[in-house]
Amino acid sequence: MTLTLLDWRRRVAALYAAARGATDPEIGWRTWRDGRDDLFADHPDSPLDDAARASFRGLPVAPYDPALRFEVVLERTDPQRLEVPTATDGVVPFERIGAVQLDEVGRLDVWWLDSYGGGVFLPLRDGSAGRTTYGGGRYLLDTVKGADLGGADGRLVVDLNFAYHPSCTYDPRWSCPLAPEGNRLATVVGAGEQLPPGGWY
């Protein structure tokens, strides 16, 4: 852990705070998208190596679709514990705290990071995985790292336009929890971050 990684997390949290505070969700999404490009291009903790940064022209992201932004009630589910082994952080424990239904897209389990600090974790592996998005899936919310779109009155804001690839997509030295069974959908979600056409940078 370094102070540069702390700075990365602060800047990510600031991008999500700006998105939550925007009067127009698409404007908030543009701020997030542009800020993410800046972090990948210039930050010392970018998951891109030097060669990839040299040819980096921005992360490929699908156009914003307002129909893919949801404010959803967290539905109760039976409790379930998930222990995810990682190369860098040991076993990472999660507890299922409920599920959200995203209209025609599907139902996703919502997890709580059951270790110091805690946080909501909502991964997604949809029908695009392994083709136009990373085979292990993407993240929608990871509040312990600042990826939080808000919500009130027992609801969560889940905006599929903010789906992003975890760092392990770009560099195998990163170890990332991947989407468990209750977070895998056959539906293709064409929104959010995509794989670069023709391979990596």
Image (cartoon, rainbow, N blue to C red):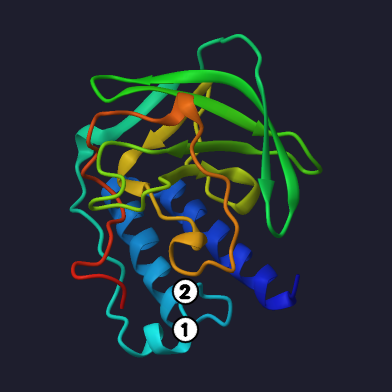
Toward which corner of the image does residue 79 lie, by quadrant?
top right
Image-based side of 18 in relation to 60, left or right: right
- Name the mark on residue 42: 1
Q: Work out how far the residue at label 2 is from the one at label 1, CA to CA, in angstroms.
A: 5 Å
* Label 2 secondary element: helix
* Quarter occupied by residue 61: bottom left
Give me the disc on residue 39. 2
The answer to whether one can see residue 24 in this image is: no
Q: Quadrant of the C terminus?
A: bottom left
**x then y, percent, for residue 173:** 59, 69
Q: Residue at x 31, y 55 (%)?
A: 193
Name the residue located 52 percent from the left edge and 80 percent from the top edge. 43
**Measured from the top left, where is residue 183 in percent x and y?**
44, 29
Is 102 in front, or is 183?
183
Density class for disc 1 (Cα within 10 Å; few <14, some 14-19, many ≥20) is few
Q: Position of residue 105 (x, y in %)?
A: 27, 25
Cβ atoms at labels 2 and 1 below 8 Å apart: yes
Q: Residues within 10 Å of mark 2 (few under 14, many from 20)?
A: some
Q: Is residue 63 left or right of residue 55?
A: left
Q: Is residue 75 above or below residue 105?
A: above
Left or right: residue 180 compared with residue 136: right
Compared with residue 45, is residue 123 higher up or lower down, i.e. above or below?
above
Looking at this view, is 64 or 85 the one in front? Answer: 85
Q: Amino acid at mark 2?
A: Leu
| Residue 104 seen in this snapshot | yes
